[in-house]
Amino acid sequence: MKKRTLENQNLLEQLKQVAQGLGETFAPFCEVVVHDLQDTEHAIYAIHNSISGRQVGDPATELGLARIADPQYPEIISNYANHFPDGRQAKSTSIGIKDSEGRYVAALCMNVDLTLFQSLQTAMGQFTSVEARVSENLDTGNAETIRARIDQFAARVASTPRSLKPEEKRALFRELKESGCLEIRKSMEIIAQHIGVSRAAAYNYVK
């Protein structure tokens, strides 16, 4: 073990605080580890949410050893595939920390347990899947058809449904009547709501 300088000791203590905050924020899905790369035999300086079963004083990983051997090793490796000792899949991010002389002295690593998220993904996929044998529209009033026609009319006059001028609204109602939209159940209520007027006002535009 190399003797830690005051600078490096301070770095480790700062990282320890960061790791604790991250660990508390992302518990229990994310393991957060601080590695002291100056002591490869006892590299784990702090660990929170120990999903891997490791503990303080455990040795450095292969990635940690690679950083020690090569100062040019990437400082940040994010979202790489990993796995825990029991086989569970993980997504990991490792951040190397250098001292003032450009040597790696520590690393902050996060290992996310993907098991729960994969289960949720599977469950959501099953929940949102639909069978193609039957098709049904729950919009029995054809409200979307009416709204679409109003939107198309407003676009033609370079406006929005709620910004239509009185003469434009009268022209709109003429088109809706000619297309049969006014025969649809609750059509006046749908139209009034979409163009932002009362039902009484909507009936006046039909006259």
Image (cartoon, rainbow, N blue to C red):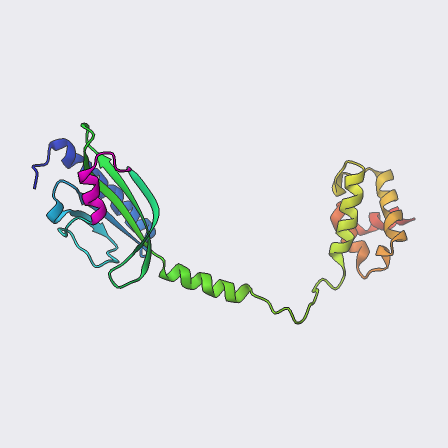
Q: Residue 205 versus residue 63: which sits nearer the camera?
A: 63
Identified at 21% across, 40% down, the residue is 67
Q: Nearer the viewer, residue 42 or 160?
A: 42
Q: Is residue 52 left or right of residue 129?
A: left
Q: Position of residue 190 (x, y in %)?
A: 76, 54
How far from the left and from the top, in percent, is residue 95? 28, 41
Q: Quadrant of the N terminus?
A: top left
Residue that appears at 20% across and 44% down: 64
- x, y percent for residue 46: 19, 48
- In this view, the residue farthest toward the top is 101
Q: Is residue 13 visible?
A: no
Q: Residue furthest right?
A: 207
Question: Is 118 on the left or on the right of 179, as rendered?
Answer: left
Q: Main secondary structure of the magenta part?
A: helix
Residue 111 % position (x, y):
30, 52
Q: Residue 24 colored magenta?
A: no
Residue visible at 78% across and 47% down in the picture = 150
The residue shown at (81%, 54%) is: 188
Q: Is residue 51 visible?
A: yes
Specify start and end residues of the magenta stretch as a single range. Answer: 62-74
Observer-nearest residue: 135 or 13?
135
Marker count (numbered): 0
